[in-house]
Amino acid sequence: MIASERYAERLDRAQALTAERGIGALLIGVGADLRYITGYAAMPLERLTMLVVPAAGAPTLVAPRLEAMAAVGAPGVRAAGIEVVPWDETDDAHALLRGLAGPGATKAGARILVSDRLWAMHVLGIQRVLPEARLGLATEILRVLRMVKDPDEVQLLRLAAHAADRVVGQIAAGRLVGRTEAEVSREVKDRLIAEGHEHAEFAIVAAGPNSASPHHDATDREIRAGEPIVLDIGGSLVGYGSDTTRTLWVTGGDPAVGPTDEFRAMFDVLQDAQALATAAVRPGASCESIDRAARDRITAAGYGPQFLHRVGHGIGLEAHEEPYLVAGNAEPLVAGVAFSVEPGIYLEGRFGARIEDIVVCGPDGPDVLNQSDRGLWIVDG
Amino acid sequence: MIASERYAERLDRAQALTAERGIGALLIGVGADLRYITGYAAMPLERLTMLVVPAAGAPTLVAPRLEAMAAVGAPGVRAAGIEVVPWDETDDAHALLRGLAGPGATKAGARILVSDRLWAMHVLGIQRVLPEARLGLATEILRVLRMVKDPDEVQLLRLAAHAADRVVGQIAAGRLVGRTEAEVSREVKDRLIAEGHEHAEFAIVAAGPNSASPHHDATDREIRAGEPIVLDIGGSLVGYGSDTTRTLWVTGGDPAVGPTDEFRAMFDVLQDAQALATAAVRPGASCESIDRAARDRITAAGYGPQFLHRVGHGIGLEAHEEPYLVAGNAEPLVAGVAFSVEPGIYLEGRFGARIEDIVVCGPDGPDVLNQSDRGLWIVDG
């Protein structure tokens, strides 16, 4: 759990950075940024809920009146003594923002930063009531805070990772042949919940040629003996994400339909690449260098064009967040940054494979949160 | 299920309305608008996926390369022959839009409409690459289409409503006293899934004084005999939403702790108000008149200020969508419009109640989809 006083510290730091960078105000809608600063996990709905952090002066939380009781009770709202400003159903909620955003936000050319997943209806509403401002993304400030996890956050990520590991083991030990991808996907979600997740956000079960589609949606295709399955599962546990991928080969108990030599050779390259990328994690290494470590190995084996996505993404209160481990991102890692390491190789129309762990950059190297076997899981199914 | 050819018709209508209203282009991100037009239910992630509908010429679907296989397979993408334009991890995805949006979108003063829940990161990206355009919300076009449900959509809403009704019955018949709100909330979600929902989005279980908070988050408070519970549950079934509220009174089997006279009197007013609002539904009645029908009754009984939200919201591919049944919305209902009718009365710190049905405006009056008893459910628990 995150201690209440942490929220007040986070708010103070966000406001200090806002002032320091000459920004007029932060306008934070429902989502991970709001949860990070206030502990308020509001449902994303069309009514405006918004934390207003002026460069100086008291922050306020604008909320629809019917959410006000819940907003007032959020741990960070209590801890920091944030005033909740309710609005009624027939009010112009956006118009309230102008009076609360502080003098720095209403000057000509002021910069206002909005949360990166704020809905267009609210972005355009803000531009209407604060026409003199130039909008940017609050990621600029929040990424500085959210990227570096404190020990409590790492512990929650670890618990989530271990829960997902257990589900991989349970699925691999169960029946697969003759069931549809969609049935297995449903079982994954049920098991994630049973293992303590509050949300089971995704459960990719991609069998046979579908394994070559990185973000395959589970279908009614039946799983057969003699084919691979890419299992990419995750959700959130006390707000923090899990995300792990393992590749299985289903034999139906018949050793004659084990993995082909071609598949084994490809998988060995992939496993090597994943290990190399993980081993490259240390403070000071650039985000793109982790991607490169995996990509160089895969490219050398001739599969370069078939590794068609970045090697990883940050993870925390969101399933995908800063930093992104992708070519062109020279940002250096620091201790406490958490992200996925997940190279894949996809031969369209034939087969594919992916291996994914959540890794935290430790002071001396990688702290790998997932603990299940990274090799090819050859199972009866 | 929605027939594939419906998607092509919807796209044609959206494009025709775009041209007719002098709009340069529609830019539709991941979400209900995209699903409505293409049947593509993509996961909302930070990589840009966007349907580009120019006022004239061929629409395209911009998608990250790793989603392209899934995008190409969406029923409406196939049916309408929409070209999928993939982008790679290091491309500037927003920059692609300029070339695809058509000549009407790059003229000075062009109007471009974006989907109303598009994330700020993409709204600002569009403003960067199409600086001459003024942005508005695609709701302007999509609401015309999405508000009026066709018979297949009404059937899906009906199936979802009946599934939710069964869950209310199951929960009311089960044990409640001594369990926490959160435990019961979890059971609701499991049962929604068991009854055919693919997502169980919310399960408000608000017991005792918590019943006075309209959007209460289920807590670890234990349910006791002699108190009310507001049960507001829903999710989606084949994409279409359920949303129903019933108020229970838990006796623990002891008739001595049945509902108080004060609670009964308040509840009778509420039930009357809900029936009056439902009875007011017919083509030509304004959205606000449905709200007023409930509000007048509640106000006459002295509870006006305690009915602190609008009477309802549209429902379809989104849990909340157009039209909103709220004071100030003079829009007339037409046959096929689907929405909630859900007055509530909330006495802060003491107790509250709400009754909610999903109602479709039929040619001659209301078609009420929920079928469970609307009265106060007095249960042993």
Image (spheres, coloured by chain):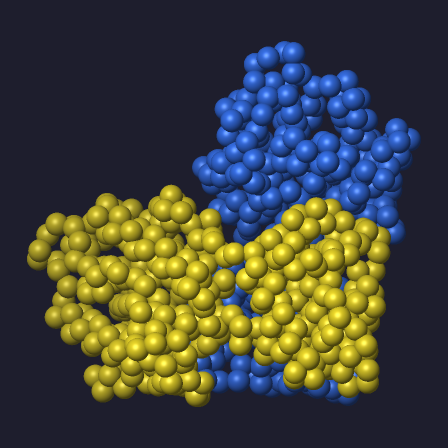
Chain colours: A blue, B yellow
> Could you tell whether A216 is left or right of A220 in the image?
right
Tell me, yes or no, if residue A215 can be seen here: yes
* Residue drawn at 65 percent across, 54 percent down: B78
**Viewer-closest of A303 and A173:** A303
* Residue drawn at 19 percent across, 59 percent down: B377
* Residue drawn at 46 percent across, 49 percent down: B198
> Could you tell whether B202 is left or right of A134 in the image?
left
* Residue drawn at 51 percent across, 70 percent down: B146
Q: Could you tell me residue A207's position as x and y percent?
A: 62, 32
Q: Could you tell me residue A234's position as x and y percent?
A: 58, 41
- Which image quarter holds the C terminus of chain A? top right
Figure quadrant of residue A257? top right
Tell me, yes or no, if residue A331 can be seen here: no
**Viewer-closest of A341 and B65:** B65
**Viewer-closest of A75 and A222:** A222
Figure quadrant of residue B11? bottom right
Instruction: Give the number of callouts.
Output: 0
> Could you tell whether B33 is left or right of A174 in the image?
right
Q: Could you tell me residue A169's position as x and y percent?
A: 56, 26
Q: Is residue A138 above or below residue A374?
A: below
